[in-house]
Image (cartoon, rainbow, N blue to C red):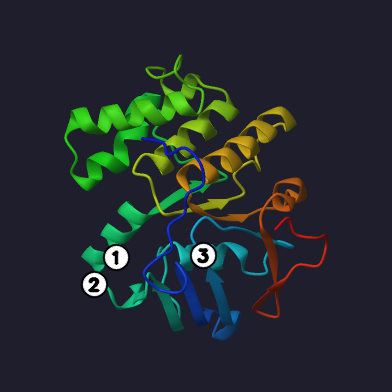
Amino acid sequence: MVNSGNNCKKPVADHLLSVQGLCKSYNNSDTRIDILKRVNLDLNAGETLAIVGASGIGKSTLLHLLGALDKPDSGTYLFKGENIFLFDNARLAQFRNESLGFVFQFHYLLPEFSALENAMMPALIKGLSKQKARDAAEAILVRVGLQDRLHFRVGKLSGGEQQRVALARALVLNPVILLADEPSGNLDKGSSEHVHSLLLELNKEFCMTMIVVTHNMELASYMSRSMTIVDGQLVKYGGYGSRD
């Protein structure tokens, strides 16, 4: 299931993902608040990006747009040359299920189900047979080091183990893009370092493009690019050199 090496294939379009002129605003007590103003972003297959900066600048809003969990006021989002915001709801849901993986600070696992059952969910939603979903989930759970926790209810797992279940769930269908919002925000230092290492290893093995919103500057420093949002626009972050 897991690819060896970092053999990224060039996508059909010039970039795997290309966002142009993305705008998003909200109304609060009849006052319009512009969060994102003409955001532009290009990413290639296998590239990693950290979005950093203070709370409230629009990082999670941008991640939700890139994850097709919300729609912009204007702008285009090309994935392999197709504007996903022109998809109907069914095709958009299929795009999210098959092409994207999500990891959040709060893992949103189902506590009454086991680690294996939680990791199977995206495969079952796609329509795979229960056996194929089970096989795929077990393989990725073993890969993230949870071979001895497959049948544990997630409520019995540590915080670091729960986040690894969430990571396995995000990766069970081999997504092209992994979106992570503060993936180690609730973890202790040891668990955080374990999750960081896994993210970097799996990025190379799956050749997946990875976008991480984080306050953890150590994690951000390992991404190939780091950016922040200033006055609603995405700009290069100048806190340290990138590791290209």
Label 2 neighbour load within 10 Å: few <14, some 14-19, many 20+: few
Q: Secondary structure at mark 1?
A: helix
Query: Mark on residue 79?
Result: none
- Front one among 162 and 170: 170
Residue for badge 3: 44
Residue 166 in view: yes
Label 1 neighbour load within 10 Å: few <14, some 14-19, many 20+: some
Q: Position of residue 17 (x, y in %)?
A: 46, 69
**Mark-to-mark CA distance, 1 and 2:** 6 Å
Q: Residue at x 37, y 27 (%)?
A: 139
Residue for badge 1: 92
Q: Earlier in the sequence, mark 1 or mark 3?
A: 3
Residue 201 lies in what quarter of the image?
top right
Q: Position of residue 38 (x, y in %)?
A: 57, 84
Label 3 neighbour load within 10 Å: few <14, some 14-19, many 20+: many
Residue type (three-letter) at the residue carrying disc 2: Asp
Residue 193 lies in what quarter of the image?
top right
Q: Secondary structure at mark 3?
A: loop
Residue type (three-letter) at the residue carrying disc 3: Asn
